[in-house]
Image: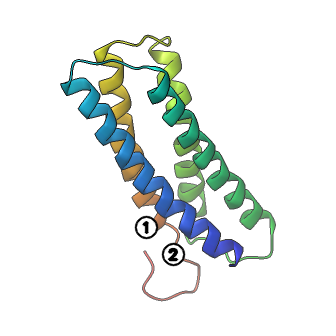
């Protein structure tokens, strides 16, 4: 599997994981539960996934691979993807109430959208049909 294929597969994994976190967070909110250790563990696993995606993206950028047509936007999506869970944790000051789990669910939905937009901006320079 080539590095661009790994990057594309990780993008799909980021999308799916973000949707799972959003659903799990919403379920916990509806049950009246807050953030617990297992939820934080899932967020940590997701953060590792997002950082792996960013690392592969940096490797592609430094290598002799074609660049996305909208490189700056694509890079910004990667930065946002990697920063959102730690930023949410910092903004909620690590609290564990229902409101915080709802915030993480909303961030999960946002990151799913960011993942989709990252894929949309990854059309390569000189490749027809990209956007």
Tell me what residue is drawn at x 73 percent, y 76 percent: 65
Question: Mark 2: few, some, or many residues within 10 Å (few <14, many ≥20)?
Answer: many
Query: Split into 4 quadrants, where in the image is the C terminus?
Result: bottom left
Q: Which mark is residue 33?
A: none
Q: In the image shown, does 111 or 105 lie closer to the viewer?
A: 105
The residue lying furthest to the right in this view is 63
Report the Cα–Cα distance between label 1 and label 2: 7 Å
Q: Which residue is mark 1?
A: 120
* Picture residue at 70% right of the left edge, 78% below the top: 2
Near-viewer residue (111 or 1): 1
Q: Establish if 79 lies above or below 30.
A: below
Q: Which residue is mark 2?
A: 123
Quarter holding the N terminus?
bottom right
Q: Are marks 1 and 2 in contact (CB under 8 Å)?
A: yes
Residue 34, given in percent of the width and then of the height, sits at: 33, 18
Q: Residue 79 versus residue 6: which sits nearer the camera?
A: 6
Residue 101 found in image quarter: top left
Q: Secondary structure at mark 1?
A: helix
Measured along the vertical axis of the image, is residue 49 above or below residue 11?
above
Looking at the image, residue 10 lies above or below residue 131: above
- Give left or right: position of 130 versus 55: left
Of helix, strand and loop, which one carries label 2? loop
């Amino acid at each position: 599997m080539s590095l661009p294929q790994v990057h594309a597969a990780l993008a799909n994994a980021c999308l799916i994981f973000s949707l799972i976190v959003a659903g799990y967070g919403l379920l916990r909110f509806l049950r009246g539960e807050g953030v617990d250790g297992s939820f934080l563990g899932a967020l940590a696993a997701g953060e590792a996934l997002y950082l792996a995606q960013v690392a592969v993206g940096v490797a592609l950028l430094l290598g002799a691979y074609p660049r996305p047509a909208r490189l700056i936007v694509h890079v910004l999506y990667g930065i946002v993807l990697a920063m959102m869970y730690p930023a949410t944790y910092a903004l909620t000051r690590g609290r564990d109430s229902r409101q915080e789990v709802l915030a993480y669910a909303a961030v999960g939905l946002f990151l799913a959208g960011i993942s989709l937009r990252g894929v949309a901006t990854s059309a390569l320079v000189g490749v027809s049909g990209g956007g």
